[in-house]
Amino acid sequence: MKMTGKEMMPETSSSGNASVPSIRDRMEELIRRKQREITAELEKIDTVKFRADSWKRGEDGGGGTSCVLQNGTTFEKAGVNISVVYGALSPAAITAMRVEHKKLQISTKGDNGEEPTGVNFFACGLSMVVHPHNPHAPTVHLNYRYFETWNADGTPQTWWFGGGSDLTPSYLYEEDAKLFHSTHKAALDKHDVAFYPKFKKWCDEYFYIKHREEARGIGGIFFDDLDDRDPEDLLGLCEDCLDACMPAYIPIINRRKDMEFTDEEREWQQIRRGRYVEFNLVLDRGTQFGLRTPGSRIESILMSLPVTAKWLYDHHPEPGSREAELLEVVKNPRDWL
């Protein structure tokens, strides 16, 4: 009889002790707790509350909870989603993922010796995207995740952590950029002082819109396929980075959310949001993974998209304008610290 869902998961812990919660269990507990904490912090700034929407991936493939706040007083849209999913990766999905995850392999045989159908997997993560109304208040994004695979006979194959957080303003405020980057650097420095420059560069390169030859925003930190340290240490790294998000963003949103703005500034925000949409739909690996995973919930995958955006034909900001200043920064990423 072929096993599905949680029955396929080998019980593992970093200590080898079955009574100790596994890394996957502790990562799941972490993202559920941080979802509650983050939504509570954001609700302090808005009069509208988050709507919690739980979903399932088929009968035995896990699921998640999407918390979305829409058309609030401060936030046009804010989403804080968690997902805990498991099942089988198809050979096609594995082939696509191996571009970034070299250790991921197609199983030579499935259950009972039949032709390979892929490998079993477990994935859990938290994603947050916040789009404020005010053009002077930046969009912020974070995602932290854990991925694990094993063969049909239950033997482990590979695992990794990934994550990061980045800031996408329509108007540049250097003090905001420095606060965001320095707060995340402090979290990373607890683990390795080499992490920040490495992950900052990785972020600049990942959130790059190739067809526009510009970055999506002013960066932050990003890492993926991280498996070269003890999983306990990497779990701690994810927790410290998640803890850094609200201290890095809440002071920024509080000093920008009530600023006066013009119709022209609002239009520039809409144009920059168009760039955000282009990256997420065309280039983002997380979006692509979700769309090609059977049973995924499309509403949750596309939660990151803003309610409103614009694409104006052949638009160019006036030289020397604040809009041109932002464009210069996204075309030539800076070292904010």
Image: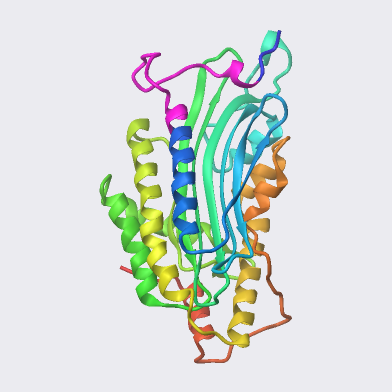
82 in magenta: no
Decide if residue 296 is on the left or right side of residue 227. right
129, above or below 10, in the image = below
- Determine the residue located farthest toward the front in the rendered image: 47
Q: Residue at x 45, y 75 (%)?
A: 256
Q: Residue at x 57, y 69 (%)?
A: 73
Q: Nearer the viewer, residue 92 or 275?
A: 275
Image spot of residue 16 (x, y percent): 37, 15
Image spot of residue 164 (x, y percent): 45, 51
Q: Residue at x 53, y 79 (%)?
A: 327
Decide if residue 133 is on the left or right side of residue 298. left
Image spot of residue 37 (x, y percent): 44, 47
Quadrant containing the C terminus is: bottom left
9, above or below 144, in the image = above
Inspect this view and state whether residue 233 appears: yes
Magenta segment, which residues?
5-26
Total numbered circles: 0
Inspect this view and state whether residue 194 appears: no
308, above or below 191, in the image = below
Image spot of residue 34 (x, y percent): 44, 44
16 in magenta: yes
Q: Residue at x 46, y 52 (%)?
A: 40
* Residue 63 image-quadrant placement: top right
Quadrant containing the N terminus is: top right
Q: Which of 174 and 216 is in front in this view?
A: 174
What's the magenta bit mostly, secondary-structure-wise? loop
Decide if residue 12 is on the left or right side of residue 308. left
Colouring rule applied to residues:
rainbow
